[in-house]
Amino acid sequence: MVVCERIPPWKCGDCQRFTGGGRGGCGRLPRHTPSSEIIEALADLKGDLPLHVEWSVNEKVALEVAAGASWTDARAAATMKHVGLNVAADPFMTLAYLGVGAGLMVICADDPFCHSSQNEQDSRRYAEFAAIPCLDPADPKEAKEMAVYGFELSEKFNVPVMLRPTTRVSHARADVDASEARPRRGRQQFIKNPARRVVLPVHARPLHTELLKKQAAIEEALQSAPWNRLELKGDAGIIASGLSGLYAEEAIQDLDLDVSFLRIGAYPAPSRMIRQLLENVSRVMVVEELEPVVEEQVERLARKVNPAVEILGKIGSIPREGELDFLVVRNAVARMLGRAEKPALRVAAAEKILPPRPPALCPGCSHRATYYAMRKAFGKKAIYPSDIGCYTMAIGMGTVDTCLCMGASITLASGIRFGGETEGICCSLGDSTFLHAGMTGLLNAAYNKARITVTILDNSSTAMTGHQPNPGTGMTATGESTVQVSLEALAKALGAGLVETVDPYDLDKAIECFQKAKEFPGLSVVIARQPCVIKARRGEAGRKSFAVGEDCAGCQICVDFGCSAIEFENERARINALCTGCGVCAKICPSAAIQEVRR
Amino acid sequence: MKTSECDIVIVGVGGQGVILISDVIGRAAVKAGKPVRGAETHGMAQRGGSVINHTRIGCRFSPMVSSGGADVLLALEPAEALRFAHFLSPEGVALVNTTAVLPVTVTTGKSRYPALQEILAPLREICKTVAPMDAIAIAKQAGTAQAMNVVMLGALSRYIPLSEDLLLAALAEVVPPRYLEANKKAFALGKAEVE
């Protein structure tokens, strides 16, 4: 159970979602995800509650651990972002057949506009595909209430339930009353029941039938869920889902409209309410972010109920890609009703004179040194598949040729070799990404004799998402010490022929190490190890200082290195206050003009 | 029909304390019993990128301020003020800290950072009031340059429907006790700056 009084009322949407919770809680958060605060908030509560909280190594693992807990009669949730659900898709699809013990929730944070993600897939499609209910909160308050409701719904219908916040819900704050608590004490016992826990074909077939039969009852129950609301007035209608419901409500108030309005927050979408609306309007606009999930259902129902109704949506009114906002929705509604649009303001000067401010590797980041050494050894023509993490921001260094999904650097590198590429191939991925989905790729590369070099950028942290621990750090989500796996031993066990570890700040040795890996006639692994500079700086005293002396020739080699602690002014380099003292620029300066100085 | 009592857009660069300002406003609004919404995107902030936060006081809709809808644009960095100027309402107020934080594109000589006047002139065309201030110098007067964001919060307090008492009570909840006095002073100096 979870006690909620501990959660203050003005908080991230993410942190609000535990109030219905049970014993479980597993998460896997690749990159700077819109769901990382959930596990961190739960980890803080752990001392007071009978709660297991973990960072699982990947999303498939997280969902399976949560399912096991659910089957032991403990409420459980696995949290991930939308692309993580792809990793967890295997257990996700079949769990819908097998069902739950205590309530089981999959919290899947979608990211329209790819604020921090590699795609903007719509997880409502996944819920529909698996035939499980999906709760689509518009704000943190709804997210909190849906978490409570979702566990009960899961238990009532014996299916997992998806909670699907989008970025503007996950990373929103609002006044929320978090005081409600629903303690629930489970049996803490796994009950054997092969017909519902062993998915042999002979069991799967009737379970599939059962799952399909439940759908009508689930939909009926959701008709009365508080997040599906219908108001009939006027000949024009608006149907809006999730966050779009708030944009639509604001548009209705802004334009002072009398329109029929259906807000949808729970799926399967409420057919009866949609029918009622369609019977009462001559045209309707469907407002939803990303996929036309509701719109397709509206079209199907309209054919039966009111074929003459005009349906406006993804074609011509509401974009199918990116985020919606109030203005987009307001203007679409205004167009439908012949009202004046409000143009979005554009500021020409901003577009013309402002310098770009892209996110970049931190000053002193060791990834920059690793990539510099890698490129020195492998050269310009080599192929550099990379992966998902901070280091993708090194794209300007010429060592990020691919980025697909977590762990794909190694497997793409293998494929590029087997596809016939004869140049050197050196791929790279972080320690956390390697442990997430890189190990199977390395095993595959070894087994199938891929001649590539795999670089593990080991900063001993999951830096991009906020320095979460991983199995390489020797610490759990709740701060307990645990086994610290050795990347060297893992790489050897998975079949790498050469495994070398190097400190990337020791630039000459790092170049030498990459040279050796390049010449190795098989699968080589370079572990470039240096703690994340953000973490290291927090506790560091006595770090070195560097300055540019008189010998600076203005060649800009250090500037091109791309560290934001190095500036170029009046034809000379200068080291600013951001310097962390890594000393790599001093090593690459051909004039030896950058020297250590006393502070 | 108005859909929010006061819409604020707070912008700056990672590490400048944009989120703290929104946090204080949110807590003060909760104390005042007003519905409040806030949103920002995370992750890239500490990597030197632009940061934007939306805060809406007395609002029950989405947390996002619309283009042309901000009653106040609070900019902790001048270039970022212009970058997000399209959020300003014609009746709005732009409060701008004048100390630049140079992006890596400028320090490496690839782009030019505009002069302050080039930034302020278009802002003045968009909205009624533009108040530039050297918030870092003011924060130093209060005892620490780190309190620059609280100087800006003090200036902002003139334009938002929340009492100073509640804002200071909320501030006390989020800054460490030993820095509270300096922060209160920074708040007062910031407020005096826009008198």
Image (cartoon, coloured by chain):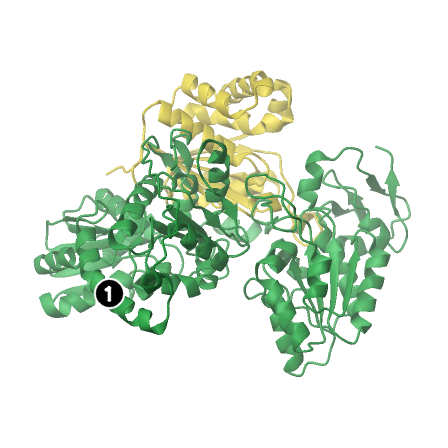
Residue A142 image point, x, y percent: 31, 42
Dot 1 amino acid type: Glu
How many numbered badges does the structure rendering display? Answer: 1
Q: Residue furthest bottom?
A: A420
Q: Is residue B20 above or below residue A68?
A: above
Give the quadrant of residue A212. bottom left
Side of B42 relative to A531 (left or right): left
Give the quadrant of residue A146. top left
Side of B116 relative to A256 (left or right): right
Mark 1 = which residue?
A210
Residue B134 makes an appearance in the image: no
Residue A498 image point, x, y percent: 78, 67
Residue B100 image point, x, y percent: 62, 38
Q: The C terminus of chain A is located in which quarter?
A: top right
Residue at 42 percent across and 45 percent down: it is A170
The chain displayed yellow equals: B
Residue at 38 percent across and 31 percent down: it is A9
Q: Is residue B170 above or below residue B91?
A: above
Q: Is residue A577 above or below residue A201?
A: above
Give the quadrant of residue A270. bottom left
SS for callout 1:
helix
Callout 1 environment at 10 Å: few (<14), some (14 to 19), or many (20+)? few
The chain displayed green equals: A
| Viewer-closest of A400 and A464 | A464
Residue A209 image point, x, y percent: 24, 69
Side of A338 relative to A591 (left or right): left
